[in-house]
Image (cartoon, grey):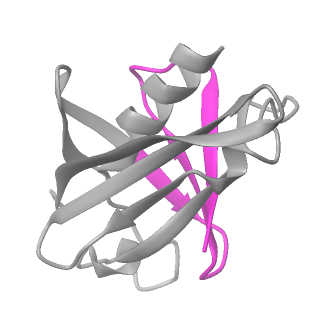
Amino acid sequence: MKKVLILLLSISMFTSCSDDDDSGSDDGTRIVGKWFLEALQPIGGQNTLNSCNQNSYIVFNADGSGNSEFFEESGANCESEGESPGNWSFEGGNTYTFLVPSLGNTTGNVNFEGDNQFTFTSSELPGVEIIFVK
């Protein structure tokens, strides 16, 4: 489970998003900020994360850089797996590219629910959604 969570957090780390408002456009800046991992679940299923995992976060910087940190329970402790740097870019439309070390470029979609939550999905992770909150 730990390796799956790390992989999914890494994959989701460096992506951008499209704006779901009526304007139909996004310059990629809506994703900028620090987002915490809220849920990892099969589409329509239940969250598989514990409160320690939910300390995990991703940061998207306006210059296309970013970083993430994943937390995992170790006995009675909640321990960091360390920070990981990366980058992301907005490609337009509903397509976004991000670089994940050792995996290369990956694409995915982000659907915002208000200004403080988004759901990440990717064809490379069929049937899985990852939810982040500010």
113 in magenta: yes
What span is in magenta? 109-134
Residue at horizontal 39 percent and vertical 43 percent from the top: 82
Give left or right: position of 78 versus 30.
right
Taking depth in this image into account, of 99 and 44 the one nearest to the observer is 99
Please state the horizontal and vertical placement of residue 34, each as a whole percent of the image. 46, 72
Taking depth in this image into account, of 110 and 64 the one nearest to the observer is 64
Residue at horizontal 20 percent and vertical 21 percent from the top: 103
Residue at horizontal 48 percent and vertical 21 percent from the top: 125
46 in magenta: no
Residue 27: quadrant of the picture: bottom left
Please state the horizontal and vertical placement of residue 46, each as a whole percent of the image. 88, 32
- The answer, for residue 93, to whether it is visible in the render is no
Note whether 84 is above or below 118 in the view shown: above
Q: Quadrant of the N terminus?
A: top right
Taking depth in this image into account, of 54 and 109 the one nearest to the observer is 54
Residue 10: quadrant of the picture: top left
